[in-house]
Amino acid sequence: MIAQNLELNSSDKSLSALGIKKAGKVFLNLTPAELVEHALANNEGVLTDTGALMSDTGEFTGRSPKDRFIVKDSKTADSVWWGDINIPFEEEKFEQLHQKMLAYLEDKQLYIRQAYAGADPNYRLNLTVVNTLAWQNLFCYNMFLRPSAEELVDFPSDFTIICAPGFQADPEVDGTRQKNFAILNLSKRMILIGGTAYAGEMKKGIFSVLNYVLPYERNTLSMHCSANVGKEGDAAIFFGLSGTGKTTLSADPNRGLIGDDEHGWTDEGIFNFEGGCYAKVIDLTREKEPEIWDAIKFGAIVENTRFLPGTRTVDYTNNSVTENTRTAYPIHHISNAVEPSRAGIPKNIFFLTADAFGVIPPISRLNKSQAMYHFISGYTAKVAGTEVGITEPKTTFSACFGAAFLPLHPTAYATLFGEKMEKHDVKVWLINTGWTGGPYGIGSRMKLKYTRAMITAA
């Protein structure tokens, strides 16, 4: 992508279309190098010895699910699956908060990025992102897909994100739970994020939008999964919750990487929603994750990490800020990434579960009813050390392996999944990446090389 290295003035149509009447300096589609320069000049981060930009996300080092809302209006009232995951927000309160955010932006230096989500041009969603932090605009460059210079000449926007970590809501006045918020308005086609600098809120906000638009409006399955493809064009997708090996197992040196987290499945095949990867780096080593290790170079971001004393070398064992240390890099930092990030109909589907009770076999072939059961239940187990308060194995279920990001009822996704699985006669496998020979504390964790060998054989 060639940057339109422009400093905009307040009369520019790009600003007026966003409702921004005036602002300080405004930069459009800066290159990664320019954004790194701005981030360093603004004291938003420092460079590591590999050239990556290290930044902190402040008070919030992960998503805040209880502070994520969807505007309830005539469009969403009867279509969204309301509850603890999809919390309703009043239309009037959204408008009030939006105007307050626009006023807050009036004297700020802004970074605007035009990008898109969806590698299949028939299903893409054009985005305009407004950031107050340069490093977060670099995150968007990495994580969303990058239009060509020709596409940027006339770039209609389908959805807008306004992300201002320094803007805090007043819960009593604005209708939020606390000062931080992420609010999706599916009718106004806008996401407002404030009070938190955790960049993953932007990524998962757009994922939630696609999880509404594609199944509800386009009859296309959206999936929380990784995907890769073999030399013969045989695509495979990997479903799994955090800690089950979804990113690790899809990064196969003998297969092309399509993407590590979010995909769609059409009648023609599968496609990546994103233009990059957002991977956990706690205890990262080159031996365990060589592809991710080598991807952390200039242009990449590392979040909430710390250096080895007296050096600019990242200490990936350091969890003094959070266990949820991460890196964000464009997918072309992976040497065997497939671009454009698309492939045909998958031949194999793998459900990954870290069974801490040693009950599930290392590999199982599932029939349709078994596959539907495991898809709708989304089982894994958390073990001691994964979260505060977890002292013994605890079962965890997340519908469709991604309940936190599903605006529709899980049966909407399960129905589409079942139809596609049956229509294309896809093989479905259950892989235990957890314990074998007994439960956690008695048995042993499945070795990665054994799991890879079983998946390769399948």
Image: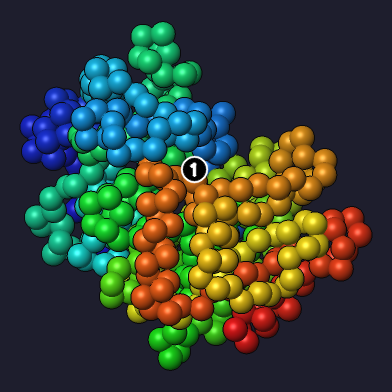
Pick the residue in front: 259 or 44: 259
Crowding at label 1, few (<14), some or many (≥20) Cα neighbours within 10 Å?
A: some
Q: Position of residue 304 (x, y in %)?
A: 60, 42
Give the percent coordinates (x, y) of residue 326: 57, 50
Q: Which residue is the extreme one toward the right? A: 442
**Which quadrant of the figure contains the C terminus?**
bottom right
Who is closer to the viewer here, 131 or 256? Answer: 256
User: Three-letter amino acid code at disc 1?
Assistant: Ala
| Of the pair 109 and 454, the residue shown nearer to us | 454
| Location of residue 423 by image quarter | bottom left
Q: Residue furthest top?
A: 172
Relative side of 370 to 189, left or right: right
Residue plotted at (44% across, 40% down): 201
Is residue 136 placed above or below 269 in the rendered structure?
A: above
Q: Which residue occupies the foreground of this view, 364 or 6?
A: 364
In the figure, is residue 49 to the left or right of 187? right
Q: What residue appears at the point 49 percent right and 65 percent down from the top-left corner?
A: 226
The residue lying at 74 percent from left, 45 percent from top is: 394
Which corner quadrant of the image does residue 450 belong to?
A: bottom right
Tell me if I can see residue 176 in this picture. Answer: yes
- Judged left or right of residue 148, residue 301 is right
At horizontal 57% and vertical 60% (from top left) the residue drawn is 374
Residue 186 in the image, given as x and y percentages of width and height:
26, 38
Name the residue tied to disc 1.
404
Q: Is residue 265 above or below residue 282?
A: below
- Asked whether, in this view, residue 207 is left or right of residue 75, the answer is right
Residue 318, can we see it?
A: no
199 up-or-down from 339: above or below: above
Q: Quadrant of residue 442?
A: bottom right
Task: Residue lying at the far bottom in this picture: please name it.
Answer: 232
Q: Secondary structure at mark 1?
A: helix
User: x%, y% of residue 198?
Assistant: 49, 38
